[in-house]
Image: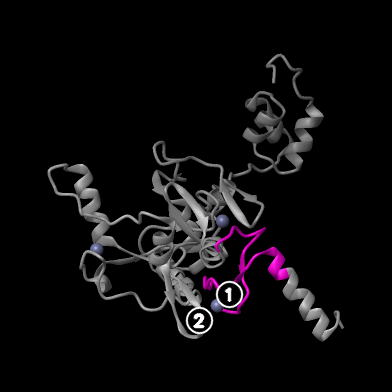
Amino acid sequence: MSPARPNASRADIIAMLRDGYSNLRISRELRCDKTRVARLRSELGLPHVVLQPLTLEQKWASKTRPVDGGHLEWIGERAKTTNTPVMRYKEVGYSPAALAFQMQHGRPPQGYVKAECGYPHCVAPDHVNDEAGRQQQRLARRAERGLGDIPAKCVSGHDLPAHAKLEPDGTAYCGMCKVEDKRAQRDPSVPRRTRHHPKTLEEAFARHAQPVEDGHVRWTGSAASTTPTIWFGGTTYSAYKVAFRLHYGRDPQGMVTPGCDVPHCVAGAHVEDRPMRQRTNTLFTAIFGGAA
Ligand SMILES: [Zn+2]
Ligand SMILES: [Zn+2]
Ligand SMILES: [Zn+2]
């Protein structure tokens, strides 16, 4: 990149002129004087190249980079404090995530747009969602997990149909309680809402284990992809493992999964560790024979 590099030859410049590049582009690429390029252009009687400015979408696309898993990384500007992608086009500021949403849905988003695919600040058009879309996705996740209707009141007696918010995994929490918690944090004179924290892992488990028909137990707590999880004493536990330990009074060996066909069932009698699964498989083979 030294400026002392030999100047471009006349033939090089002419070749690029004939290829239809602009004077600016040629002078930059060949590191030569722009007026020299312009002179050659008129000498040869070649038309001027008018630079087509990028469209909003083209500029957006030029600032993105595909990442494994179908995600799209923003390689353009970001907001300093939040690291959120931002973009400027013709003196106007845009949210790259909102533009991605508009491209995907053909309409402007309602509310804040973001992706919940796990890739931080992903701007893949099919990964981002607006407020309404997120709510829909979470309700679907809730239905998938069989978490049922949102209760009428929260533990503090707030009206849940009005205040309930959903987590990405479909679990519900009270938005009013959260607001009050935040208020109390800012102003220490406001009495802290007395929140009952579980004292044991067993208590934490019981809080979210809801017996349903046929001995199955539905998990109403949070879940990491396929495993129901318990947050207790600063650690995340698999609810399957806790259910196993409570039921059998011993630690499981290997992974614990439900042996029944109800998704996320945490019934102690239904979960199995590795040796139990192996026994079940052997028994199955003994009765029905090997794979056909
Ligand atoms: Zn993504
Ligand atoms: Zn509440
Ligand atoms: Zn079950």
Which quadrant of the figure has residue 204? bottom left
Q: Amino acid at mark 1?
A: His
| Quadrant position of ligand 3 | bottom right
280 within the magenta span: no
Q: Is residue 210 visible?
A: yes
Q: Residue at left 12%, top 43%?
A: 189
Q: Which residues are magenta?
A: 249-277
Q: Which mark is residue 270?
A: 1
Q: Residue at x 47, y 48 (%)?
A: 235
Residue at numbered disc 2: 215
For numbered disc 2, what is the local secondary structure? helix
Q: Disc 2 and disc 1: Cα gap in Å?
A: 9 Å
Q: Where, by quadrant of the figure, is residue 187 drawn?
A: top left
The numbered mark at residue 69 is: none
Q: Is residue 171 at all visible to an observer of this figure?
A: no
- Seen in the picture, residue 101 relative to 142 is either above or below; the reply is above
